[in-house]
Image (cartoon, helix red, strand yellow):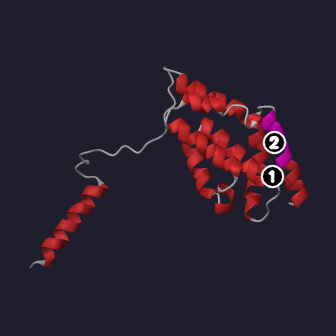
Amino acid sequence: MKTSEIENIENKCIESMRNNDLEQFQYNFNMVKHQYNTTKTSVSTFVKACELMILLSTDFLAYLYFLETLDYEDINNEHIMFVLGIERLMTEENVALINQQLGKYKEWDGCIRSIIKALESKDSRFKMEQINVAAEPAEHSPLQTIKDCILFSKNFNKI
């Protein structure tokens, strides 16, 4: 795919965000995301930031996975830093400060509103996926097996 074709599709992505048409954004983004390993345009990082914002407002686990694919240059971008700031405010459940972020990037206002709505909702409270670590591991858990093996090997060396 030529750089001009990629840029054309990215511009369609941005237009979809402006129209709050997330399905069309995803359709266009899926056509170019595999090209980012070899080709970047002037708007590639903004489009990636749009994808991050959508994922932050819809699927936190996918957001984390996509965040891991970004390189250092991407993460230092002001748009991605903005999304990371929204994530921080979201985890703090600071609705007042999130409200202040509305209008800074008009393309993302719909996503930010859905985050605010989810945080304010008592019924379907927005919760991030968390790893539940039990205080007492199960009797046959892999972690317990490893501990038992280490203790056994320490005693074995004393003989």
Mark 1: amino acid: Val
Mark 1 or 2, nearer chain start = 2
Q: Measuring 56% from the left and 48% from the top, which residue is drawn there?
A: 64
**Residue at the right extreme?**
4
Mark 2: amino acid: Ile
- Residue 72: quadrant of the picture: bottom right
Badge 1 crowding class, 10 Å Cα cut-off, few under 14, some 14 to 19, many 20 or more, is: some
Q: Magenta residues, as a range?
A: 10-18
Q: Measuring 37% from the left and 43% from the top, which residue is drawn there?
A: 132
Provide residue 124's location: percent of width, then percent of height: 51, 24
User: Quadrant where the N terminus lies?
Assistant: bottom right
In the structure shown, which secondary structural element does the residue marked by tag 1 occupy?
loop
Q: Calculate the distance from the C-alpha at mark 1 to the C-alpha at mark 2.
A: 9 Å
Q: Which residue is mark 1?
A: 43
Decide if residue 12 is on the left or right side of residue 152: right
Q: Total number of numbered labels?
A: 2
In the structure shown, which secondary structural element does the residue marked by tag 2 occupy?
helix
Q: Is residue 45 shown in magenta?
A: no
Provide residue 156's location: percent of width, then percent of height: 14, 75
Callout 1–callout 2 Cβ contact below 8 Å: yes
Decide if residue 46 is on the left or right side of residue 53: right
Q: Which residue is mark 2?
A: 14
Q: Is residue 85 above or below residue 98?
A: below
**Residue at the left extreme?**
159
- Residue 40: quadrant of the picture: bottom right
Q: Measuring 57% from the left and 28% from the top, which residue is drawn there?
A: 96
Depth order, front residue of 31/70? 70
The chief SS type of the magenta part is: helix
Depth order, front residue of 115/144? 115
Residue 110: mark in rendering: none
